[in-house]
Image: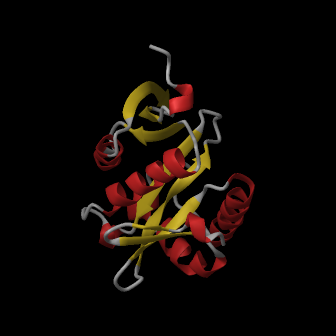
């Protein structure tokens, strides 16, 4: 693992996912209280392992990816946050899921904000998107709280989906004037 990919915030340690996170990821992704609202829903054991392998490959290919989020004080697993290409081609998206026990404490906002800053400031990614169900108020609050703005809306199987984006303007790509 590249040490430059590790992020520390006031309360969190974020490290790129690895096979040592597999048991925690299985518990998170099999929990219907957490993953029932995610694209693809609750995952089984094989799907979690396949996704972990894909996430590790993504880090190697792109220098960004998914982080395991842990409490900096005791290393307890709190959730998952990171960046991955959307399967619908809408762009590089921020994704997050926190364990049921850690929800409502601001961890998702802290982790997602750190991931977004990493994308813009360290990885040089100008545009990051995110998608949330209109009914998922918690996710929408996190996305707004980290400065993302709503930019699109569509229907997916009877659910209203909202897309958010964050655009980072570097000095090189600022308009003249």
Residue 153 in picture, x, y percent from top left: 43, 26
Nearer to us in this view, 171 or 100: 171
Which residue lies at the image location 34% right of the left edge and 40% below the top edge?
Answer: 147
- Tell me, what colour scheme is on the image? secondary structure
Farthest bottom residue?
A: 74
Quarter that holds the N terminus:
bottom right
Give the vertical position of 73 relative to 171 (above or below): below
Q: Is residue 55 left or right of residue 172?
A: right
Q: Quadrant of residue 102?
A: bottom left
Farthest left residue?
A: 105
Which residue lies at the image location 30% right of the left edge and 64% below the top edge?
Answer: 103
Residue 5 in picture, x, y percent from top left: 57, 64
Give the vertical position of 175 relative to 90 (above or below): above
Residue 74 in picture, x, y percent from top left: 37, 86
Using the rendered image of the protein, determine whether residue 9 is visible from the camera's viewpoint: yes
Nearer to us in this view, 8 or 159: 8
Quarter that holds the C terminus:
top left
Q: Quadrant of residue 78?
A: bottom left
Q: Is residue 157 left or right of residue 108?
A: right
Farthest top residue?
A: 177
Using the rendered image of the protein, determine whether residue 40 is visible from the camera's viewpoint: no
Residue 96 in picture, x, y percent from top left: 45, 56
Give the vertical position of 69 relative to 171 (above or below): below
Which residue lies at the image location 67% right of the left edge and 59% below the top edge?
Answer: 59
Q: Quadrant of residue 133?
A: top left
Q: Is residue 128 left or right of residue 37?
A: right
Nearer to us in this view, 138 or 165: 165
How many numbered marks have been drawn onto this rendered protein structure? 0
């Amino acid at each position: 693992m590249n040490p430059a990919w590790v992020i520390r915030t006031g309360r969190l340690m974020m490290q790129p996912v690895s096979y040592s996170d597999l048991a925690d990821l299985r518990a998170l992704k099999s929990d219907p209280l957490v993953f029932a609202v995610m694209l693809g829903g609750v995952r089984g054991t094989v799907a979690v392992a396949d996704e972990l392998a894909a996430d590790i490959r993504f880090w190697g290919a792109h220098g960004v990816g998914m982080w395991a989020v842990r409490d900096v004080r005791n290393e307890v697993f709190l959730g998952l946050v990171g960046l991955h290409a959307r399967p619908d081609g809408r762009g590089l998206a921020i994704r997050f899921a926190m364990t049921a026990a850690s929800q409502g404490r601001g961890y998702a906002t802290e982790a997602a904000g750190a991931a977004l800053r990493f994308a813009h400031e360290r990885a040089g990614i100008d545009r990051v998107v995110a998608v949330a169900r209109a009914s998922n108020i918690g996710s929408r609050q996190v996305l707004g709280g980290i400065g993302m703005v709503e930019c699109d809306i569509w229907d997916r199987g009877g659910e209203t989906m909202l897309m958010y984006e964050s655009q980072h303007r570097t000095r090189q790509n600022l308009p003249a004037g």
